[in-house]
Amino acid sequence: MANVASTSETHLISRVSWLRAAVLGANDGIVSTASLIMGVAAAATSSNEVLVAGIAGLVAGAMSMAAGEYVSVSSQADTEKADLERERVEQVNQPEFELDELAEIYIKRGVEPDLARQVAAQMMAKDALGTHMRDELGISESTTARPIQAALTSALTFSIGAAMPLLMVLVSPTDLLPWTVSIASLLFLALLGAVGAHVGGAPIWRATLRVTVWGALAMALTAGIGALVGTAV
C-alpha cells in the first residue's frame, strides 16, 4: 500500500477564488471597452474621440470592478464570519448536540452510525470548529472569501483586457476602426476563454465558444445603438 502521506495532489479548485475574478475582469474589460469603442466609433468622427472614450472606460471600469468585487466578496466574508462565530458559541453551549449533528452528516454520507459518531468525536477533539466549518457549513480554505484579492485581481485583469481593444484604436485606420476592434476583440476573447479553461481544467472549446459568442452579441448591440444615436444626432 502506497504511503499517502508521502504523496500530494494539486486540485484545480484551489484556483477558483482568483480565477473567477481574473476571467470576469479580463472578459468585462475586453467586452465593455470594445463595445464602448464600437458605439463611439459609429457616432464619432475622429479616432482621438474614440481613444479618449476608451481610456475613460478603462479607468472607470477598473475602479468599478474593484469596488464591486470588494463589496460583494466582503459580504460573503461577513456571512462566513457570522456563521463561524455562531458555530463557535454553539460548540461551547451545546457540545453534545454539535457532536450528534456532525455524526448525522457522516451517516448521510454513508458511514455506519456507530463509526460516524466515533469519527465525529475524534474530529471534534482535534479541531471542532474547523471540522464543522468544512463539513457542516461547506467553507474550505481554498474557497473562502478574499475581498482584497478579488478586488485587485479584477481591477488588474480588467485593465489588461481593456488595453487590448484600445491598442487597436492606436494602430488601426479610422475608416477600418470598427472592423479592426471587433475582429481583434473576438480573437482576444477566444484566447481568454481558452486560457481560462486550460487553467481551470475545463473543456477549452466550450469555454472559448461561450465567451466569444456573448462578446460578439454585446459588441454588435452597442455598435447598433451607437449608429442609431449618431444618425439621430
Image (cartoon, helix red, strand yellow):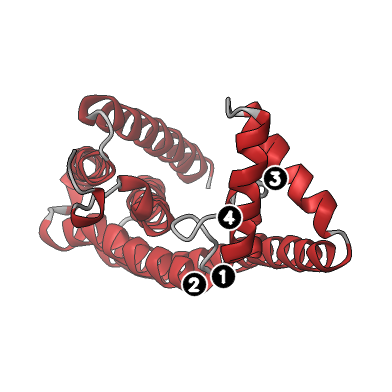
Question: Marks 4 and 1, how far apart in space?
Answer: 39 Å
Judge whether 23 appears above or below 78 on screen.
above
Query: Viewer-nearest of labels 2 and 3?
Result: 3
Contact between labelled residues 3 and 2, with CB atoms less than 8 Å apart: no
Which residue carries the number 2 mark? Answer: 63
The amino acid sitting under disc 1 is Ala
Question: Marks 3 and 1, how far apart in space?
Answer: 38 Å
Question: Marks 2 and 3, how far apart in space?
Answer: 43 Å
Give residue 102's mark.
3
SS for tag 3? helix
The amino acid sitting under disc 4 is Met
Among the 4 quarters of the image, the one containing residue 213: top left
SS for tag 1? helix
Question: Marks 2 and 1, how far apart in space?
Answer: 6 Å
Query: Viewer-nearest of labels 3 and 1?
Result: 3
| Spot occupied by residue 68 in the image (x, y as percentages of width and height) | 58, 63
**Closer to the N terminus: mark 4 or mark 1?**
1
Contact between labelled residues 1 and 2, with CB atoms less than 8 Å apart: yes
Contact between labelled residues 4 and 3, with CB atoms less than 8 Å apart: yes
Which residue carries the number 4 mark? Answer: 123
Residue at 16 percent of width and 63 percent of height = 170
Contact between labelled residues 4 and 2, with CB atoms less than 8 Å apart: no
| Spot occupied by residue 137 in the image (x, y as percentages of width and height) | 66, 50
Mark 1 neighbour density, 10 Å: few (under 14) some (14–19) many (20 or more): some
The amino acid sitting under disc 3 is Leu
**Closer to the N terminus: mark 2 or mark 3?**
2
**Closer to the N terminus: mark 3 or mark 4?**
3
Which residue carries the number 1 mark? Answer: 67
Q: Is residue 8 left or right of residue 125?
A: left
Mark 2 neighbour density, 10 Å: few (under 14) some (14–19) many (20 or more): some
Question: Marks 2 and 4, how far apart in space?
Answer: 44 Å
